[in-house]
Amino acid sequence: MRDPRYNILFEPIKIGPVTAKNRFYQVPHCTGSGWQRPRILAGLREMKAEGGWAVVNTEYCSVHPSSDDPPHPCASLWDDRDIRAHALMTEKVHAHGALAGVELCIGGARMANLDTREPSMSAVSMPNLAGNPFQTRAMDLDDIKEVRRWHRNAALRAKTAGFDVVYVYATHGYLISQFLSPTINTRTDEYGGSLENRIRLLREIIDDTKDAVGDTMAVAVRFSAETNGGNGGDGLPEPGETEEMFGTLGELPDLWDINVNDYSIEMGLSRFVQQGALEPYVKKIKSLTSKPVVSVGRFTSPDMMVSQIKHGVMDLIGAARPSIADPFLPRKIEEGRLEDIRECIGCNICYMGDGKGVPIRCTQNPTMSEEWRRGWHPEKIAQKKSDSSVLIIGAGPAGLEAAHSLGKRGYSVMLAEADRELGGRVTKEAKLPGLAEWIRVRDYRVQQIEKMNHVEIFRESEMTAEQVLEVGADHIAIATGAEWRRDGYGPNALGGIADLAEPKSVFTPDDILNGNLPEGKVVIYDDDHYYMGTVIAELIRKSGAQVTLVTPADTISSWGYYTYDRWRAQTRLMELEVDLVVSHGLRYFDGNYVQLECGYTGREKTVSTNVLVLVTARSPKDTLFEELSRRCSQATQSNIITLKKIGDCDAPAIIAAAVYSGHRYARHLDETIDVDNPLKHDRVFFEDA
Ligand code: ADP
Ligand code: SF4
């Protein structure tokens, strides 16, 4: 039963002509599926509705081919043939009593239209804000009329598709924000210059949308609180402008969806940004309008949500990531099952799908994007198909997830872990600077497993092949993880690096995770390109050592581009006075200096150091698996039905991949999987092409 303290979260909220059944609001968020994968999208959005979110939104939805954003997948409502794909989602969302919203988007200088090759347009002719060498065309008055018409038509299609909420998107560097910006919008006609002129397009599009569909659909405006929507580096409002603007526009839409322009705050990594970071910005807007306000803050705690409402910060609790990590978060609060909430860890692996153009995935929720194509429900799983027992070796993310999901299926599971502490790499990495929230990967699973009598945990049980066989389990999963390599092998040195000093002055992340910190002058060589190199640099620098971070890539933490680690990490290291050397490969280390080689010119450079930390690649710890395979193949009669490797022991990767691997193992046990077609392939409707 629900704790009465949380009753306020379940109050219905009127949003213009529609009513949200509670205050849980899934804000628009990218899914990496866009118009290309409509069924995957409908499947994942349905889960949010089933899980209790009152409003479930699409990602940004382009209104016309002149707003086209590859490689980032966006939804589209370009013509009537787009309606069917959206209707798939709205029907499923409605079936669970939720409202469906669509975030209409006009690209402006943020989109270069690389697919459609239509000219990109903005208030003025300005550089593309996504780094493409294409400038926009300055819109004339006819262009403005056309853009308004496209937006209106898209709103009408959204209505036909069954949406209940339609957005006017006035932030994040898309077209309307350029019109709002005092810096960018230097037009001299009635759409530029004064505040009244700069807000004209936004006002007209709100009016158009209300006129077209406002009788039955709520009109929401997404707006950046600190820049009045402006982007391009310095679109800050003049003092008093926000107040003046809300004097004109504050009561026009049915809902204000408030964020900040800077993604690194808005969807801040837990490594750098705390929960509820938008509060000061949102609170200000809330004081300027009587319309409902929604915003985000990586909220996973119902107490924090209640406090946001009671303190007048927002009316609806917006969430992207918490709804991805746990689509059933509202329902768990409603049913008084707080310990079952799978809390987001703030790692932003979910954001990677947008940058890579692939379906969204989540470290905590392995079923994300797999609802339709694999039939995976985040809360339900098929019951066991036999009375077989399963022995899992290793309680890292892969082993814990496998044990948890097999336990849910009803299997009798034994989980053996060499260490006293469970969690494997997550337990160790969560002790690194800024990564404390990552421990939720372990805690959620351990908490669930501890409720299951048929899952037994054996700590401090380092298993040999002999001992494994003695247990006599029917199925064995080896989840023994991986270890960082000490030979320099990595993407930039596939033959390893021959000339390295004696092991005592060469460290790997495992040494550091085991509490062995180097001192003196330290060079960290990052050929891994994600978070580990920069996090370790921060840790070692803070312990007082002099640190140089070297990478063969052209930027620090280059893969961190996809998770938003990169920029903040570089800022932090620069603030800590860590020396940064990019575009250089490591060639040699003799205990006194490292020799580096420029990736472009081949010129050599030396840095004096007494310690080298190699963050390059990992080796699977699969000797136990190999030994068991050998014994099983030699035995004339083996009782083992299956022997499998999962997680990093199978293929070292990110934590999300280990969780996924453990989950997949659990789903597939005793099931017949068609190896030729292990998942359904989403395609746009062929007959509509
Ligand atoms: P993954 O990310 O694949 O889950 P981790 O490296 O996080 O891998 O976890 C592997 C876990 O396996 C570690 O906790 C480690 O202590 C444990 N382990 C490794 N070898 C054995 C073994 N022979 N017996 C029991 N546990 C083991
Ligand atoms: Fe949260 Fe990470 Fe999942 Fe994104 S991928 S929802 S940040 S746990």
Image (cartoon, rainbow, N blue to C red):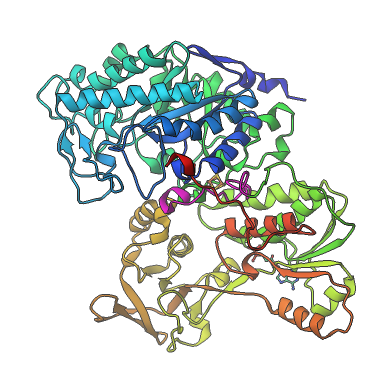
- Residue 629 vertical placement versus 327 (above, below): below
Position above or below: 113 against 503: above
- Secondary structure, magenta segment, majority class: loop
In front: 144, or 19? 144
554 horizontally vs 386: left or right: left
The image position of residue 656, as x and y in percent, is 58, 55
259 in the magenta segment: no
Residue 623 picture quarter: bottom right
Q: Residue at x 50, y 82 (%)?
A: 487
The quadrant of the rendered image in which ligand 1 is seen is bottom right
In this picture, residue 63 sits left or right of residue 448: left
Instruction: Look at the image and tell me in which quarter the N terminus lies.
Output: top right
Find residue 671 and report its horizontal and vertical position in percent.
Answer: 77, 57
Q: Nearer the viewer, residue 609 or 16?
A: 16
Furthest-left residue in view?
A: 188
**Residue 573 appears at what percent x and percent y?**
37, 58
Q: How many marks?
A: 0
Residue at 59%, 73% (x, y): give it: 483
Answer left or right for 608 relative to 237: right
Residue 173 lies, in percent from the top left, at: 30, 37
Q: Residue 635 occupies which quadrant of the picture?
A: bottom right
In the image, taking residue 190 as reference, residue 422 lies left or right, namely: right
Q: Is residue 288 visible?
A: no
Q: In this picture, is 481 found above or below 398?
A: below
Reply yes or no: does residue 372 show up in magenta: yes
In magenta, the rendered stretch is 353-373
Residue drawn at point x = 41 percent, y = 29 percent: 80
The answer to whether residue 638 is visible is: yes
Which quarter of the rendering shows the C terminus?
top left
Closer-to-camera residue (295/42): 42
